[in-house]
Image: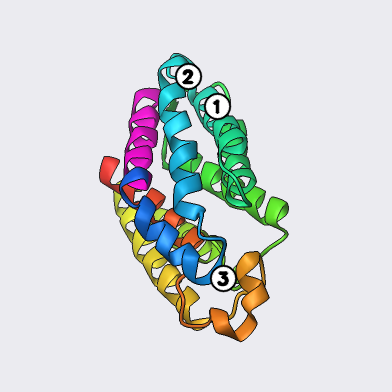
Amino acid sequence: MLDTAKIVEIIRAIAARIESEKDCLTQLDNEIGDGDHGINMARGFKAVAEKLPELSGGDMGTVLKGVGMQLVSNVGGASGPLYGTAFMKAGNVLNGKDEIGAQDFAQALAAAIGGIEMRGKSTEGEKTMLDALCPAYKALEEKLAAGADLKAAMGAAVEAAQKGTEYTKTIVATKGRASYLGERSLGHQDPGATSSLYMLQEIYKCL
């Protein structure tokens, strides 16, 4: 079971990781985007970290929706609305809950991905964050269905997300700023998939 305190710990870990990887994310975005993904994400998660003490008294839904609101308000570019929507949709699933099991977690991740697909009008295979998140969710569900616990299932999810992030180097972007480059986007790793991978890795570590 995960409780609200563990969710807050995970969010703090994600915020610290994004800050530490800010330059790497910016470098990836310099190659195929606006060059601001790392800066924007770090700014957003700094705001999230500052808001967490205020949010941590609520249930899981309150925490995650609060995180989403901070990201929408503080992250520039497409990433703010996309990640913000993801956290808010996950928060809706966990509304009123102080403790969750593996299936609740999987449902929240599915809702987050659905939010990104809806807001970004995108699907897996377009060189976006979905190329990390969709394979991660599939691996998570498969492992849970086979009787694994959440930690083992998240281990498989992270592996799948790593492969998906690597895969973005081999495809042409058809969504976002990178799509303007066409064939020139080949060979470059998607920054959004990379930041999603970092988040999944932090969730796994905290479990």
Instruction: Write down the region rendered in magenta.
Output: 1-18
Quadrant of the rendering where the C terminus is positioned: top left
The residue nearer to you, when weighing 88 against 168, is 168
* Residue 176 drawn at (x, y percent): 65, 64
* Residue 95 drawn at (x, y percent): 58, 26
The residue nearer to you, when weighing 106 against 11, is 11
Quadrant of the rendering where the N terminus is positioned: top left
Q: Is 13 a magenta residue?
A: yes
Q: Is residue 106 visible?
A: no
Q: Is mark 2 in CB contact (under 8 Å) with mark 1?
A: yes
- The type of residue carrying mark 2 is Leu
> Whole-Å distance between the Cαs marked 2 and 3?
33 Å
Based on the displayed image, in which of its 4 quarters is residue 175 positioned? bottom right
Q: Residues within 10 Å of mark 3 (few under 14, many from 20)?
A: many
> Whole-Å distance between the Cαs marked 1 and 3?
28 Å
**What residue is shown at x 56% (from left), y 36% (from top)?**
74
* Residue 56 drawn at (x, y percent): 43, 19
Query: Mark 2 vs mark 3: which is more N-terminal?
Result: 2
**What residue is shown at x 53% (from left), y 62% (from top)?**
134
Q: Residues within 10 Å of mark 2 (few under 14, many from 20)?
A: some
* Residue 100 drawn at (x, y percent): 44, 32
Main SS of residues in magenta:
helix
User: In the image, is 128 to the left or to the right of 31?
Assistant: right
Q: Is 155 a magenta residue?
A: no
> Whole-Å distance between the Cαs marked 2 and 1?
7 Å
Q: Which residue is mark 3?
A: 127
Q: Which residue is mark 2?
A: 55
The residue nearer to you, when weighing 138 against 144, is 138
- The type of residue carrying mark 3 is Lys
Q: Which residue is mark 1?
A: 66
Q: Residues within 10 Å of mark 1 (few under 14, many from 20)?
A: many
Based on the displayed image, in which of its 4 quarters is residue 180 positioned? bottom right
